[in-house]
Image (cartoon, helix red, strand yellow):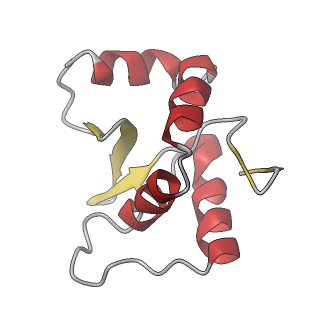
Amino acid sequence: MIGSGHANVQYVKDNMALEADENDPMHPDLVVANWLQDKDLTQQYVKCMEKDNLYKDIYKGARDGEKILTIQYKDKFLYILKRATWKLVIPTGLKFRSKSA
């Protein structure tokens, strides 16, 4: 949970009762990305990332194949390496259950 997205990922985890995969400690937020995919929210995530003032350029670069050691683009989701763990970025405006994440 990076920048404005840090508290947002925890909010999703808490409200959806999502547990990180203990077998993959490097990707604790993968459970949130999987949940977003299961709820057909991937396209909404992409649209919000493309508009997010803080992350839109980073997202576009990662999507277009730009290689940065601390940035990972996987299955249309953006992760940033922080403290040896990949953190999912939640963009401003992403909504689930008609609430902003």
* Residue 70 place in picture, x, y as percent: 26, 39
- The residue that appears at 57% across and 24% down in the rendered structure is 47
Give the camera-side residue of 62 and 3: 62
User: Quadrant of residue 23 in the image?
Assistant: bottom left
* Residue 28 place in picture, x, y as percent: 37, 68
Give the camera-side residue of 39 and 56: 39
* Residue 32 place in picture, x, y as percent: 48, 61
* Position of residue 23 in the picture relative to residue 87 (left or right): left
- The residue that appears at 53% across and 48% down in the rendered structure is 40
Q: Number of marks in the image?
A: 0
- The residue that appears at 68% across and 65% down in the rendered structure is 11
User: Quadrant of residue 44 in the image?
Assistant: top right
- The residue that appears at 40% across and 77% down in the rendered structure is 20
Relative to 27, say whether 99 is above or below: above
Relative to 77, say whether 68 is above or below: above
* Position of residue 26 in the picture relative to residue 20 (left or right): left
* Position of residue 27 in the picture relative to residue 95 (left or right): left
User: Quadrant of residue 14 in the image?
Assistant: bottom right
